[in-house]
Structures are given as structure tokens and as C-alpha cells.
Image (spheres, rainbow, N blue to C red):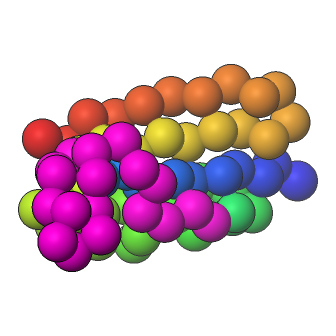
């Protein structure tokens, strides 16, 4: 079964809130691309998330999607 790691990264610098551009905000593992859909949509709606990375844990291939 395919396994993926989804990571969202801050695209803003707000040190007073503990957010620095490039820091990982959230990282999770999923058993298929379908289970990531709702979480990706949530990240797209957050103004503090700058990009997401999806890594295929079998091939170690990573793709990045810039949101802002």
C-alpha cells in the first residue's frame, strides 16, 4: 500500500506567535492520496501556510506546492 508524508511549512514570519518562514507547521503520514485531500484543502485556506510537500515514502520522491 502506498504511504505518503504530508508536511506544511509556514510562509510568514511572526516570531511573536512562534512562526518563522520555512519552519514545519504540521507533518503527518497517510495511507494514500485520497486521505490527504481534506487536510490539503485546510492548509490552502490557512493564510500562514506558504507551501506543502508531499513525499512518497516508497520512492522517496517529493513534490512541493506553493500556496502563497
Seen in the picture, residue 57 relative to 25 is either above or below; the reply is: above
- Of 13 and 5, nearer the camera is 13
The residue depicted at 46 percent of the width and 54 percent of the height is 24
Residue range in magenta is 11-28
- Residue 55 x %, y %: 64, 39
The residue depicted at 88 percent of the width and 53 percent of the height is 1
Side of 34 relative to 59 (left or right): left
The residue depicted at 55 percent of the width and 42 percent of the height is 54
- Residue 5 x %, y %: 66, 52
Side of 8 relative to 6 (left or right): left
Number of marks in the image?
0
- Of 66 and 32, nearer the camera is 66
Seen in the picture, residue 62 relative to 44 is either above or below; the reply is: above
Residue 67 appears in the rendering: yes
Magenta stretch: includes residue 8: no
Quadrant position of residue 44: bottom left
Side of 16 relative to 65 (left or right): left
In which quadrant of the rendered image does the C terminus lie?
Answer: top left
Quadrant position of residue 51: top left
Given the current orientation, which residue lies at the most extreme front position?
16
Amino acid at each position: 500500500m502506498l504511504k505518503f508524508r504530508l508536511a506544511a511549512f509556514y510562509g510568514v514570519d511572526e516570531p511573536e506567535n512562534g512562526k518563522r518562514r520555512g519552519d514545519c507547521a504540521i507533518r503527518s503520514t497517510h495511507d494514500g492520496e485520497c486521505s490527504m485531500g481534506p487536510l490539503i484543502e485546510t492548509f490552502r485556506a490557512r493564510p500562514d501556510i506558504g507551501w506543502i510537500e508531499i513525499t512518497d515514502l516508497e520512492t522517496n520522491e517529493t513534490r512541493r506546492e506553493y500556496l502563497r
